[in-house]
Amino acid sequence: MTTTPEGDLEFLPEEIPVPASTAIPWKLLVVDDEPEVHLITRMVLQDYIFEGRALTILEARSAEEAKGLLMAHPDIAVILLDVVMETDHSGLDLVRWIRQDHGNFLVRIILRTGQPGAAPEKKVILEYEINDYKSKTELTSIKLFTAVTSAIRAWRDLKIIKRSKEGFQKIVNASRELFGSRAVGHFIEGVLTQLTSLLYFDDESLYLHSEGLALQGSAEEYRIVAGTGTFHSLAGGTLDTVPDLELRGLLTEVIRDQTSRFADNYYLGFFSQEDSHQQHILVLRTSEPIKSVDQEIIDLFATNVSVALENVNLNQKIESTQKEIIFTLGEVLESRSKETGNHVRRVAAFSYQLAKQAGMTESEAQMIRLASPMHDVGKIGVSDSILNKPGPLSPEELTEMRKHTLVGYEILRYGGSGILQTAAVIALTHHERWDGLGYPHGLQGENIPFGGRVTAITDVFDALCHIRVYKKAWSTEEAWAYLKEYSGKLFDPALIDAFFQIKPLVEEILSHYDD
């Protein structure tokens, strides 16, 4: 248990316990050109209730009208479909459109016809993706009720399977980007989706996160970092923005007692990570009291969530340690050449923002941000007399200085992590030129790796703006003019354009890390 109450809240609200009249209804689409069929269907199903939810009946008099309703209501569960309408095969054409063109394989289609001879049952079942075939004369009220209920139950189960797959995919995607700024939120959102699928709940969940407050004895504050369903709009808010006063009271009790609990239609799971100032609360709200068997499933799932959160915390600690090592080593190397350690921090920040502006993903930009501070690690093999020479270098000294790209590559290339591999490439290529006149290999254009092209710009820009043993600091206007002048010669012109697009941000970073 941590003494500082900070952490994460995950809300997984389900169907709120409300009367059937206000619960989200099932949707049934009746497609038939006979007004009497619509009237009879409404009369038979007017009091329909299944699993506490009523039935909304949508009506279409033609296949074209049905297409519009299907596009406007993607959550239609069942279609009662006539075969003969505008043409003798309008219904069958609509089935083909639903499955092939519209791509809806979840909606359950019950074909009912008053002219069985126009659409033989065996042929239709074999050739069209329908789920049931009924003659209008055989559909008594009880048989209609049974057919609709069976179809709704099948649609519900298919939705659960689909949602389960989506939840699993979210977890997989989040685990690929654990170093991303929203990785924890993505991961938990997927975990909650999996739990709703497991327990046959609906698609509403919420995840709250809180950083620990340093004030002892003060009320803790929680920040919402992810949400789905009706809670999606609350993302970014705090505990006080949760509209349900009962739930807010339960959360206060769980935070105070630091323990999990079941309460009526709620499960609130409390998780506290060792060696961390984070807490997590998983909140589940259901439409009816949670059964004992479901409580066992939830408890087991909560154990897995706890382990997952510990692993995320461990990864964050490893990442933090890697960052400190990288920046510290970069600062040490810069100090040898009498340059401030803020140089590597500015280059890292510039490089991250430029990579993002150029269209890189968050994880790709973060990788460049972490690797770019190592661009001059090879200077460890260059003598102090050359590094700190105030005047121009001789041809021999220049040759020796240029070797730092190869030395840096050799130091870093055997590293097992992606960061070190990226850093090795940047160290090797950040002095290559767009026109092919750079070193060490004379690479040209897009043959120069992206990280090397980015760092070439950010390194030179920062060096121009600050004092070096061989030069005075340039004004930012002069530095920007230099980049523009050598766009397409020294630098990738597309990246130069992108760098200019974030000019205010670049100058803000310059000010923040001022020497």
Image (spheres, rainbow, N blue to C red):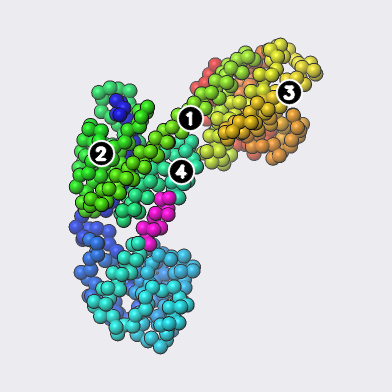
Q: Which residues are magenta?
A: 158-168
- Residue at the disc numbered 2: 260
Label located before the other in sequence (4 or 1)? 4
Question: Which one is closest to the eye, mark 2 or mark 4?
Answer: 2
Specify the label residue 402 is tagged with.
3
Residue 422 at x, y = what percent?
61, 33
Q: Please state which of residues 6 and 23 is positioned toward the viewer in this rendering.
A: 6
Instruction: Name the residue: 69% across, 36% down.
Output: 448
Q: Is residue 418 above or below residue 378?
A: below
Label located before the other in sequence (3 or 2)? 2
Mark 3 and mark 2: Cα distance apart in space: 61 Å
Q: Residue furthest bottom?
A: 117
Report the amino acid beneath label 4. Answer: Ala
Q: Please state which of residues 39 and 174 is positioned toward the viewer in this rendering.
A: 174
**Is residue 75 found left or right of 180 in the rendered image?**
left
Q: How many marks?
A: 4
Under circle 2, the secondary element is loop
Q: Is residue 56 above or below residue 257?
A: below
Report the amino acid beneath label 1. Answer: Ile
Report the amino acid beneath label 3. Answer: Arg
Say if residue 30 shows up in the picture.
yes
- Residue at the disc numbered 4: 174
- Residue at the disc numbered 1: 318
Residue 165 at x, y = what percent?
42, 54
Under circle 4, the secondary element is helix
Under circle 1, the secondary element is helix
